[in-house]
Amino acid sequence: MTVRPENEHQARLLALLRDDGPRSRAELGDLVHMSRSKVAVELDRLTELGLIENAGLAASRGGRRSGIVCLATSLRFVGIDIGATSLGVAVTDGELRVLGHVSEPCDVRQGPEVVLGLALSLIDGLRDRGLMPAVHGVGLGMPGPVSFREGVPVVPPIMPGWDRYPVREVLGRELGCPVQVDNDVNIMAVGEQHAGSARSVDDFLFVKIGTGIGCGIVVDGGVYRGASGSAGDIGHIRVAESGPTCACGNVGCLEAFFGGTALVRDATAAARSGASAQLAARLVEAGELRVADIAAAASAGDVAAIRLVRTGGRRVGQVLATLVSFFNPGLIVLGGSVSGLLGHALLAEIRSVVYRQSLPLATGNLPIVLSELHDTAGIIGATRFISDHVFSAP
């Protein structure tokens, strides 16, 4: 069983050491506004618990030199990022530095036993490389609605067989440590907040455009999940009275018009109709199209591919313009595989719509940017997520 801090003072000290690195005992006392004797008591107890260790002596501040402490070098957190078509696993130290990261193609529709079995196999592989003497906690994100309190997915549209599967319980039993489970977009938002563009922003939106579309909402520095955990599911906002049927069963959802699945569908139709010679040639060559093919065609000036990107960007921008007027965020970060591949062409279209349609007071100082973390946002967010849990007082 993972050892955790015993009180709020110890929790604050651990968070400081995680976020700022090794500190002298004197510095920590100044930062948490505690007497030197009180800090010494709490740090000694954390040492006894195996959560921190000594790391030499600090420079003199006049008088006796203060000892430097750091998080225990044996601390290990695991992040698992389950996507619709891929699975990533990483191990970090206590300061959330990535020590090893592996990923494999994986179809989430294969079901929880197969997908979680692969995750455990990848964790075993990292352990075999000597990267984790023990696992102190696991954070996991998945592409569907999650009951955060129970640690289970709830009727996820693209995940047959996963409904109410006890993910947290199963992984906790297999690995013998605390496990936290959340929607992948919330996890990615936490990653951006910890190490990405949102490090100094308390109120922002993280928009993931991948196979589908979702939004992580951060309010006053914390993820907002709503009453039941479904906040931010913007892919299922209705943007048209008619149109393609969405994976959720409704008609006219944003995700049914744009996102990886919809983009490939429309590009394939353009290739077969003769609207795009470049996409048609690629379809013949590979047998199927991918988002990377559409991005390459758009970059090469293919009119049909450019039209698909612009049309999708406008639809996303229209939804975000409404959210900006409602929520007034300080930042919007675009992430996910489709955003990463389409890059600035998609970003420019979304910016244009949001800045044009939202009120000037809401957009006057609103950056809209691409994620700096790319495909590591979920991994970093998952380990930050579980470390917050492990480093919190009971």
Image: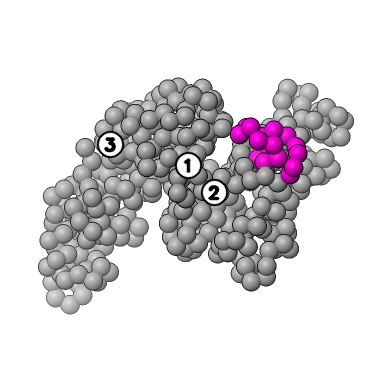
Q: Earlier in the sequence, mark 1 or mark 2?
A: 1
Query: Judging from the image, what secondary structure is the residue with disc 3 in?
Result: loop
Disc 1 + disc 3, Cβ < 8 Å: no
- In the rendered image, residue 104 lying in the magenta stretch gets the answer no
Select label 1 or label 2 by which is in front: 2
Q: Quadrant of the N terminus?
A: top left
Q: Given the image, on which type of amino acid does mark 2 rest?
A: Gly
Q: Nearer the viewer, residue 251 or 223?
A: 251
Three-letter amino acid code at the position of disc 3: Cys
The answer to whether the residue labelled 1 contacts the one labelled 2, judged by CB atoms less than 8 Å apart, is yes
Looking at the rendering, the stretch of residues picked out in magenta corresponds to 240-256
Q: Nearer the viewer, residue 141 or 242?
A: 242
Which circle's residue, 3 or 2, is located before the other in the chain?
Answer: 3
Residue 280's spot in the image, x, y percent? 81, 29
In the picture, measured across the screen, residue 7 lies left or right of residue 247, that is: left
Q: Is residue 361 above or below residue 248?
A: below
What residue did someone put label 2 on? 232
Identify which residue is drawn at 64% across, 55% down.
320
Is residue 201 visible in this depiction of the protein? yes
Residue picked out by circle 1: 183
Q: Position of residue 232 (x, y in %)?
A: 54, 48
Q: Which color scheme does this rendered protein use?
A: one colour
**Chief secondary structure of the magenta portion:** loop
Q: Residue at x 44, y 62 (%)?
A: 220
The residue to which callout 3 is attached is: 177
